Image (cartoon, rainbow, N blue to C red):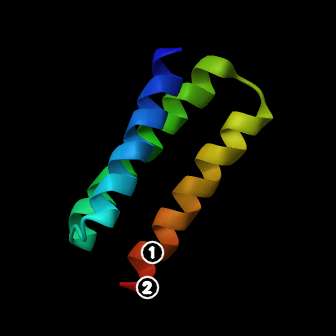
């Protein structure tokens, strides 16, 4: 339960920072933290769904880093 709460709180923080016009570098740091929290949640919960979500976040961050 703590992992899911951390993910939801991180998402809310990212949305608030984005709405406030936060620099992309700060958002990127938050997204990396979100990935770590999502991976922890996926490990705790098990199953394919959580692992797919974490893998999707990891891939999206990797694409963003390549495009910069």
**The furthest residue to the top:** 1
Which image quarter is the N terminus in? top right
Q: Residue at x 25, y 64 (%)?
A: 20
Which image quarter is the C terminus in? bottom left
Residue 12 located left or right of residue 49: left
Classify 10 Å Cα crowding around label 1: few (below 14), some (14-19), many (20 and above). few
- Secondary structure under the numbered disc 2 in the rendered image: helix
Residue 57 located left or right of residue 23: right
- Name the image quarter holding residue 50: top right
Q: Residue at x 48, y 67 (%)?
A: 62
Q: Which residue is mark 1?
A: 64
- Residue 64 vs 17, above or below: the answer is below
Residue 53 located left or right of residue 25: right
On the image, the x and y values in percent for residue 39 come to 53, 35
- Secondary structure under the numbered disc 1 in the rendered image: helix
Figure label count = 2
**The furthest residue to the right:** 48
On the image, the x and y values in percent for residue 53 come to 66, 46
Q: Which residue is mark 2?
A: 67
**Near-viewer residue (16 or 42):** 16
On the image, the x and y values in percent for residue 22 come to 22, 67
On the image, the x and y values in percent for residue 17 come to 28, 58
Classify 10 Å Cα crowding around label 2: few (below 14), some (14-19), many (20 and above). few
**Near-viewer residue (16 or 60):** 16
Q: Residue at x 59, y 18 (%)?
A: 44
Q: Residue at x 38, y 40 (%)?
A: 10
Mark number displayed over residue 30? none
How far apart marks 1 and 2 lie (CA) works out to: 5 Å
- Residue 50 vs 45, above or below: the answer is below
Answer yes or no: do the residues labelled 1 and 2 have beta carbons within 8 Å? yes
């Amino acid at each position: 339960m703590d992992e899911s709460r951390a993910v939801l709180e991180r998402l809310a923080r990212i949305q608030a920072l984005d709405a406030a016009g936060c620099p992309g570098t700060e958002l990127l740091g938050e997204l990396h933290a979100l990935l770590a929290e999502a991976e922890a949640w996926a490990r705790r919960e098990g199953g394919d769904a959580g692992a797919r979500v974490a893998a999707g976040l990891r891939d999206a961050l990797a694409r963003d880093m390549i495009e910069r």
